[in-house]
Image (spheres, grey):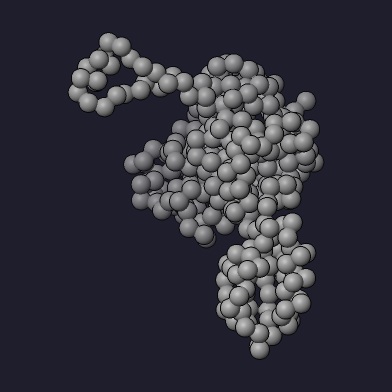
Amino acid sequence: MPVIQIENLVKSYQVYQKQEGLWASVRGLFHREYRLVEAVRGIDLTVDQGEFVAFLGPNGAGKTTTLKLLSGVINPSSGSATVMGFVPWKRENAYRRRFALVMGQKNQLWWDLPAAESFRLHQQIYGIDKADFDHTLAELTDLLDVAKLLQQPVRELSLGERMKMELTAALLHSPEVLFLDEPTIGLDVIAQHNIQQFLKYYQEKRKITILLTSHYMKDVAALCQRVVVINEGQLQYDGSLSGIVDRFSTHKMISLQFGEQDSLDDLARFGDIVQIEPPKARLRIARAEVARVLSALLDQYTIEDVVVEDLPLEEVIAEVFAQGKDVPRNHDAMTEKVPSQ
């Protein structure tokens, strides 16, 4: 049985439409107009034990809403979901003890107290045995290199240090499922890398199931074999990271080194110039045109070296988001099952 199973999950909101102007505001006190917002629109998804799944989509796509539904924070409008056999919105204590939710834009630690005090509160809330608590805390703070910061008020920590403390708090009760919502948002490159390395090591060691949302494609490339894309509340893609490049990328990047005598003035007729520093240049070419363009370039220029690459992952994902509803929702065409890690 999958650890996470979602069937036709829907979440809709009614949002008050405030009109401009004084009299319109007064009329709104008596005759309110509402707009229906469909945050999640019939998602079907299964996640097996031990998978590390990237859950991607543009802002407002429904990612965070889905994580809140799976965490039991909000109730769905319709559909069903189970996590480890539990219905999340029943909010059973047995379920709460087996998962954790970390939101990069929300703090769960007391701002003015040292993190150690919040950790002890977590120990009492989850009823963690003292020996287990001490062992887990020592392990996590050692892996994240924050042991020396435990007695420092949270408000005095850097953003990266605070996120490490948030992860420590979330993992103290050794959850079997972890929901991560933008855990590296706002962090510098070094802090992002440190968090990535920790998550990769911890997930491989504990074999926990992780669902990650992130706008940083380096997080996805470093951590996840499987990618789920949601757009406008609907599932758009479910498959491997390499599969998303093969299916959605419409262009290739060609890096060329020309002979010293070649003039590159008319190079733009072969494709979009990304960079040109004679005798080197990079072109963005439609995938279907790569063979023809390379043949034409070889006929006209002295090519000393050529490299054909996929576009950067960020650009491919942007193309996926841009296609939106134009992508067919046929499940067989959309889904490429990825083996569990």
Residue 52, quarter of picture: top right
Q: Quadrant of residue 227?
A: top right
Image coordinates of residue 63 in percent, x first then y, are 56, 34
Q: Residue furthest left?
A: 22
Q: Position of residue 39 (x, y in %)?
A: 52, 27
The residue closer to the viewer here, 316 or 211, is 316
Percent position (x, y) of residue 203? 67, 44
Q: Residue furthest bottom?
A: 261
Most extreme residue toward the top is 30
**Relative to 18, does residue 296 appear above or below in the rendering?**
below
Question: Residue at position x 39%, y 18% from top?
Answer: 34
**From this viewpoint, is residue 188 visible?**
yes
Picture coordinates of residue 72 (x, y %)? 55, 23
Q: Nearer the viewer, residue 274 or 120?
A: 274
- Is 5 rendered above or below residue 120? above
**Front position in the image: 326 or 191:** 326
Q: Quadrant of the N terminus?
A: top right
Picture residue at 51% right of the left edge, 56% below the top? 191
Q: Quadrant of residue 85?
A: top right
Q: Image check: 268 left or right of 160? A: right
Vertical side of 292 occupied by 27: above or below: above
Quadrant (top left, top right, bottom left, bottom right) of the C terminus: top right
Task: Give left or right: position of 8 versus 339.
Answer: left
